[in-house]
Image (tube, helix red, strand yellow):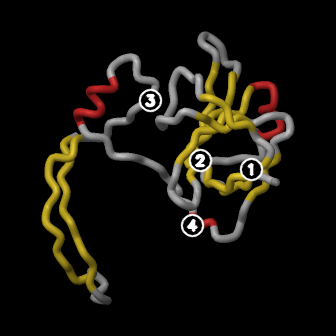
Amino acid sequence: MKVFVIARVARMWQNVYANSDTVARIDLLLVDADGSAMQAVIPNGILRWFFERISEGGVYKILRFDTVECKLYFVVIPSTYIIYFSTTTHVEEVLESVHMYSRYFFRFASFEEICLRGDKEPVLTDVIGVLTHVGEKSTVERSSGHGKVDKIDIIFKL
């Protein structure tokens, strides 16, 4: 049985050792066709095999990887497991039906949820603002004059 994942690399970043320019690993935030996200790690020892072959925004079929318990100090999504690339991992770029894979991944969190995370929570959180109002749905004419769309006004406090 061949197990594989097809996903878009929504985010890709290097983790460097403190007080050094040496890359410890590359982390990936992957999003599959269902909109589910998973974190993947490419360790230092095999970076050279994948560094030029994977880019942020690309869609890839990933084969022969390890699924390991997540023991990272910081993660971008809450998860018990992560995908861990190994010397046997194979990556193929996917060029068809890439529109099925979201380019970005984010999840709204309530103010209470963010406060409960505290200092020891390993999930990194970006706060872009606080949602203060959600208006009623209304139907409006498109500016092009070609049809109508539903609209909901929202207000963010930055």
Q: Earlier in the sequence, mark 4 or mark 2?
A: 2
How far, Cα to Cα, is label 4 from label 1?
Answer: 17 Å
Instruction: State left or right for residue 88 relative to residue 33.
Output: right
Residue lying furthest right in this view?
88
Extreme-front residue of the structure: 1
Taking depth in this image into account, of 122 and 24 the one nearest to the observer is 122
**Left/right of residue 118 with respect to residue 52 in the rendered view:** left
How crowded pointer 3 is (Cα within 10 Å; few <14, some 14-19, many 20+) is rated as some
* Residue 14 percent coordinates (x, y): 63, 30
Q: Amino acid at mark 3?
A: Val
- Element type at marker 4? helix
> Residue at 69% of width from left, 52% of height from top?
5
The residue where tag 3 is placed is: 123
Tell me the distance, in whole angstroms, between the alpha carbons under discs 4 and 2: 13 Å
SS of the residue under disc 2: strand
Residue at 69% over, 22% down: 24
Chain-order first, disc 4 or disc 1: 1
Instruction: Tell me the number on the disc at residue 62.
Output: 1
Label ID, residue 30: 2
Whichever of callouts 1 and 2 sits on the residue coming sooner in the sequence is 2
Residue kind at label 4, given as amino acid type: Met
Above or below for 14 versus 37: above
